[in-house]
Image (tube, rainbow, N blue to C red):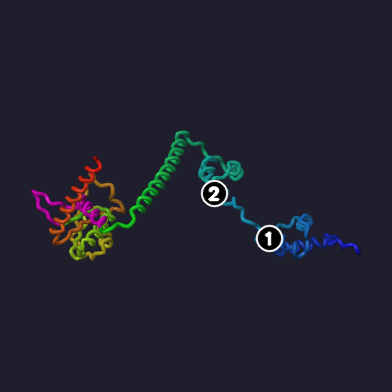
């Protein structure tokens, strides 16, 4: 059998072809397939000294980390802080920032305060996550309320937050006041359950005079789905710097007053239902004690 011709005999000619293809933007794989070069060592020699085209270069995953590390170093961060922030090794950080000026040494007391603050911020984040988890679990356990459950809840809600009749001050009317939107929504759902028509409801806002009065009025009107014509004049509380409330920020909207017109009969039903709840609770307590 005739000897196989050495396909790499004309190395220089092959190298010129490889270099031309490389400069034309071909990758190593494309050049290998085009010239039928199966030996990686030969391919390396053919392409020696010729840089790869830009499109074949893979982005360095650490480039962003390096840039961020240099940015933090210029802000005066220590290696320890950069390592904690970026999660990379100190040796890498040292290589990336060694040409930058060293930050001024901080007062040990200041460093301790910063470290303590960072630990406390982490602790607060952990606590808040746990707080939200517990709230979510508790909310899921409530499920769907029956009409009886909503009725009993509404009676207790009104007796805690609504106006009540006194022997010395007869007030057999239904007036509910609260600043919690959730409480307002539950109270309205309870009135719907009792078949109290929304047309019998009148509203009013009570708020500090230095708050966003117009914004609060619109907020409550949107929440209850009522026209502003069903709102009585807003009651403004005088501002006293010595006793000023802390919740007068953007989320402060005062209190909403809900009054049921011709509500004396409803009030008597509420009071009677509350007495029934109290008596039932006493009986349950007695059973639990025996």
Percent position of residue 115, x then y: 46, 38
Q: Residue at 32% of width from left, 57% of height from top?
A: 144
Q: Are marks 1 and 2 in contact (CB under 8 Å)?
A: no
* Residues rendered magenta in the picture: 148-173
Is disc 2 surrounded by few (<14), some (14 to 19) or many (20+) residues within 10 Å? some
Whether residue 41 is visible = yes
In the image, 95: left or right of 36?
A: left
Residue 221 located left or right of residue 174: right
Q: Quadrant of residue 257?
A: bottom left
Front-most of residues 281 and 221: 281
- Residue tagged 2: 68
Which element carries disc 2, helix, strand or loop? Answer: helix
Mark linked to residue 134 = none
Q: Give the Cα distance between marks 1 and 2.
A: 27 Å
Residue most extreme to the front? 290
Q: Residue at x 18, y 64 (%)?
A: 200
Reply yes or no: does residue 92 show up in magenta: no
Picture coordinates of residue 237, whole percent (x, y) = 20, 51
Along the horizontal axis of the image, is 265 left or right of 285? left
| The one of 263 and 226 positioned closer to us in this rendering | 263
Task: Report helix, strand or loop for mark 1.
Answer: loop
Residue 255: in sight, yes or no? no
Q: Residues within 10 Å of mark 1 (few under 14, many from 20)?
A: few
Magenta stretch: includes residue 165 = yes
> Which quadrant of the figure contains the C terminus?
top left
The numbered mark, 1 or 2, whose residue comes first in the sequence reads: 1
- Residue 52 position, x and y percent, is 70, 58
Percent from the top left, x then y, of residue 247? 28, 49
Residue ID for mark 1? 53
Q: At x 24% / y 58%, what residue is drawn?
A: 190
């Amino acid at each position: 059998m005739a000897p196989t011709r050495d396909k790499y005999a004309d190395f220089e000619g092959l190298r010129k072809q490889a270099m031309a293809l490389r400069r034309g933007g071909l990758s190593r794989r494309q050049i290998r397939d085009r010239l039928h070069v199966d030996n990686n060592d030969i391919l390396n020699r053919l392409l020696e000294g010729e840089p790869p085209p830009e499109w074949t270069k893979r982005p360095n995953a650490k480039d962003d980390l390096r840039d961020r590390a240099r940015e933090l170093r210029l802000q005066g961060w220590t290696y320890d802080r950069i390592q904690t922030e970026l999660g990379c090794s100190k040796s890498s950080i040292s290589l990336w920032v060694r040409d930058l000026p060293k930050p001024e040494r901080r007062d040990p007391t200041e460093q301790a305060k910063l470290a303590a603050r960072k630990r406390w911020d982490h602790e607060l984040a952990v606590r808040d996550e746990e707080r939200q988890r517990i709230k979510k679990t508790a909310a899921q356990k409530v499920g769907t309320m029956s009409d009886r459950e909503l009725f009993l809840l509404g009676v207790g809600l009104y007796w805690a937050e609504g106006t009540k009749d006194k022997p010395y001050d007869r007030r057999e009317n239904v007036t509910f006041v609260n600043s919690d939107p959730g409480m307002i929504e539950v109270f309205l759902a309870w009135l719907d359950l009792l078949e109290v028509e929304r047309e019998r409801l009148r509203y009013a806002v009570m708020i500090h005079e230095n708050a966003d009065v117009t914004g609060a009025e619109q907020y409550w009107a949107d929440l209850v789905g009522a026209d502003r014509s069903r709102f009585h004049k807003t009651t403004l509380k005088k501002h006293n710097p010595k006793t000023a409330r802390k919740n007068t920020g953007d989320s402060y909207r005062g209190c909403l007053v809900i009054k049921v017109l011709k509500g004396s009969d409803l009030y008597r039903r509420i009071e009677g239902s509350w007495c029934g709840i109290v008596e039932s609770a006493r009986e349950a307590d007695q059973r639990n004690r025996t």
